C-alpha cells in the first residue's frame, strides 16, 4: 500500500508541472515547468515504479535500511516540487509577454561572419582538447583514451578525496555550443542547407565533447539546444518534427549507455537510469532525510561555496570541493571511496535547512518564471539574443538547480556567460525598439 501511495504522489508531482507548463509556459515543451516535469518523471515517478517491482535497483538501499525512509524522502521531495510549482504560478503576471518570435527571427537572420564562427568553434574545441590531454598526460593516439576520460573524472586526488576535474578548461567548450545554436537558428530561418550542414557538423563535435567530458548530460544539453532553438523561432511542430526529436532522444539514451560501458559498468539501460542518482532523484531525498541531522545543518553555507571556487586547484591544492555531493558522501554518509553522490537541488536545501528547505523550492519556481520572462521578452531578444541565452544559460541553471548543487553551477556559469555574451556581441547585430512600449506592443526596429 505504501508503494502505491508513493507512486500516486510521484504521479501528481509530474502532472502538475506539465499542466503549468502547458498553461503558462512561454516555450512549448521546454518551459521551466516542462523541464521540471521531465526531471521528475525520470528521477521520481519512473524510479519509484521500478523500485516497487525490482527493489534491488534502488541506489539508496545500499546505504539506508530504515523502514520508513522511502516514504519520508518521497514526502519531502513532493513538498519541494509542489512549492516550486506554486512559486512559478505566483510569479505569473497578466502582462507577461508572449514569446518574441518575430524578434528572434530578425536577430537570428542577422548573424554575420558565419565562417569565422564555425572555424572558431572547432579551433577552441581543439585547443581545449589539447590542454585536457596535456593535463592528464595522455596522447591523442592512446587506445584507451575515451575509457580514461570517462572512468577518471578527477586527477591529482588529494588526501581529502578531492581532485581536479579540469572544469575551468571545459568551460571553453561553451564556444562550440553557442556557435551551434547561432548557426542552427540562422539555418532554420533562411532554410539554408549549407548553414544546416555546418550546424550538423557542430552537433557531431558536441557529441565528441560529451564523450571527452565524460558527462552524459552534455548529450541531453545538445538535444535541448536543438529543440529549444527550433521552438523559440516559432516553427511548426508536426509529425516529422516529433519523429526527429524522438530519434534524438533515443540517440541520447544509447550514447549514454555507451558512455556507461566506457566506465566499466555492465548494466542494462533501465538499470543505468533508475539505479543512478541522476535527474530529480528520489534516492538523494531518501538519503538526506534519513542521514542528515539537525546538528549538521549547513544553514545556507553551501550556497556560498562558489566564492572560493574561482581559485584554481593548481594554486590551492587542498581546495575543498564546491560540489556538496562530496560532503554528502564522505562526511555525512561516511563512505570513503572517491567521487561523490549527486545531491540534487532538494537534497542541498535539506542539508542546509532541514524540512524548511522545501521553501527553497518556492523561491526557485519564482526565479524560473521571472528569468523565463526576462529572456524571452522582445527587448531581451533584440538586445541580447534571448532565444540563444534561454537554452545556453537558463536551461543549465534549471538542470543544475534540480539535478546538482548551486555553487558548482555558479562558478562555471559566470565564465560561460561572459563567453556567450562576447560571441553574441561579435556575431549578431544590435537592435532596439524605437519607442518604450509595453511588452506586447510592437515598435520599429533599428540597428
Image (cartoon, rainbow, N blue to C red):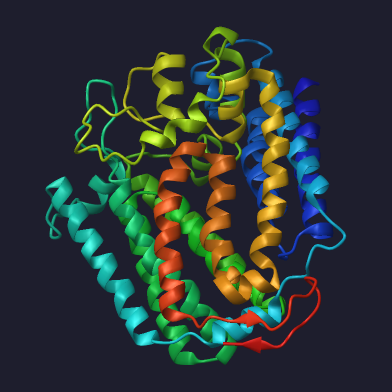
Quarter of the view holding residue 440: bottom right
Q: Nearer the viewer, residue 2 or 316?
A: 316
Front residue of 443 and 49? 443
Instruction: State the residue at coordinates (40%, 85%).
Output: 114
Residue 73 higher or lower than 379, as above or below: above
- Image-quadrant location for residue 265: top left
Q: Residue lying farthest front? A: 435
Q: Is residue 341 visible?
A: no
Where in the figure is residue 365, as x and y percent of width and height?
71, 44
> Which residue is at 69% across, 74% downward?
378
Is 120 displayed left or right of 291 in the figure?
left
Residue at the right extreme of this rendering: 94
Judge left or right: residue 334 versus residue 402.
left
Relative depth, front residue between 277 and 302: 302
Residue 217, visible in the rendered structure: yes
Does 375 sit left or right of 268 as displayed?
Answer: right
Q: Tell me the residue at 72%/45% (across/down).
A: 366
- 248 or 408, which is in the foreground? 408
How many labels sit on residues?
0
Q: Is residue 340 above or below residue 212?
A: above
Residue sitting at x 71%, y 60%: 373
Residue 441 in percent (x, y) is at 81, 78
Quarter that holds the C terminus: bottom right
Name the image quarter holding the N terminus.
Answer: top right
Q: Position of residue 44 (x, y in %)?
A: 66, 36
The x and y percentages for residue 26 are 74, 64
Amino acid at each position: 500500500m505504501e508503494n502505491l501511495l508513493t507512486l500516486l504522489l510521484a504521479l501528481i508531482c509530474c502532472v502538475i508541472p506539465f499542466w503549468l507548463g502547458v498553461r503558462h509556459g512561454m516555450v512549448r515543451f521546454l518551459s521551466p515547468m516542462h523541464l521540471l516535469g521531465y526531471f521528475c518523471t525520470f528521477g521520481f515517478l519512473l524510479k519509484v515504479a521500478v523500485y516497487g517491482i525490482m527493489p534491488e535497483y534502488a541506489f539508496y538501499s545500499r546505504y539506508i535500511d530504515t523502514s520508513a525512509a522511502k516514504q519520508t524522502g518521497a514526502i519531502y521531495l513532493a513538498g519541494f516540487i509542489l512549492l516550486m510549482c506554486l512559486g512559478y504560478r505566483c510569479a505569473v503576471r497578466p502582462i507577461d509577454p508572449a514569446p518574441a518570435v518575430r524578434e528572434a527571427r530578425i536577430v537570428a537572420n542577422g548573424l554575420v561572419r558565419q565562417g569565422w564562427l564555425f572555424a572558431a568553434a572547432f579551433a577552441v574545441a581543439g585547443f581545449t582538447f589539447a590542454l585536457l590531454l596535456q593535463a592528464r598526460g595522455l596522447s591523442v593516439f592512446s587506445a584507451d583514451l575515451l575509457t580514461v576520460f570517462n572512468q577518471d573524472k578527477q586527477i591529482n586526488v588529494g588526501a581529502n578525496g578531492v581532485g581536479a576535474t579540469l572544469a575551468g578548461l571545459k568551460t571553453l567548450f561553451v564556444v562550440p555550443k553557442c556557435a551551434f545554436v547561432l548557426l542552427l537558428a540562422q539555418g532554420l530561418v533562411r532554410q539554408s542547407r549549407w548553414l544546416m550542414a555546418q550546424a550538423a557538423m557542430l552537433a557531431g563535435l558536441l557529441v565528441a565533447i560529451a564523450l571527452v567530458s565524460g558527462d552524459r548530460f552534455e548529450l541531453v544539453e545538445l538535444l535541448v539546444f536543438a529543440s529549444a532553438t527550433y521552438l523559440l523561432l516559432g516553427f511548426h511542430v508536426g509529425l516529422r518534427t516529433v519523429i526527429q526529436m524522438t530519434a534524438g532522444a533515443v540517440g541520447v539514451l544509447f550514447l549514454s549507455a555507451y558512455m556507461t560501458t566506457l566506465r566499466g559498468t555492465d548494466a542494462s539501460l533501465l538499470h543505468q537510469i533508475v539505479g543512478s542518482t541522476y535527474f530529480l532523484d528520489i534516492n538523494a531525498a531518501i538519503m538526506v532525510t534519513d542521514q542528515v541531522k539537525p546538528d549538521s545543518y549547513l544553514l545556507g553555507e553551501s550556497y556560498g561555496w562558489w566564492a572560493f571556487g574561482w581559485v584554481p586547484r593548481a594554486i590551492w591544492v587542498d581546495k575543498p570541493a564546491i560540489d556538496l555531493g562530496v560532503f554528502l558522501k564522505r562526511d555525512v554518509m561516511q563512505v570513503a571511496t572517491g567521487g561523490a553522490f549527486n545531491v540534487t537541488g532538494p537534497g542541498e536545501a535539506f542539508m542546509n535547512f532541514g524540512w524548511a528547505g522545501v521553501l527553497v523550492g518556492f523561491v526557485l519556481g519564482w526565479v524560473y518564471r521571472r528569468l523565463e520572462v526576462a529572456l524571452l521578452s522582445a527587448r531581451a531578444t533584440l538586445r541580447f539574443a534571448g532565444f540563444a541565452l534561454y537554452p545556453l544559460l537558463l536551461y543549465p541553471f534549471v538542470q543544475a538547480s534540480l539535478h546538482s548543487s548551486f555553487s558548482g553551477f555558479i562558478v562555471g556559469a559566470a565564465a560561460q556567460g561572459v563567453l556567450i555574451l562576447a560571441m553574441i556581441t561579435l556575431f549578431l547585430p544590435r537592435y532596439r525598439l524605437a519607442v518604450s512600449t509595453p511588452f506586447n506592443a510592437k515598435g520599429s526596429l533599428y540597428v
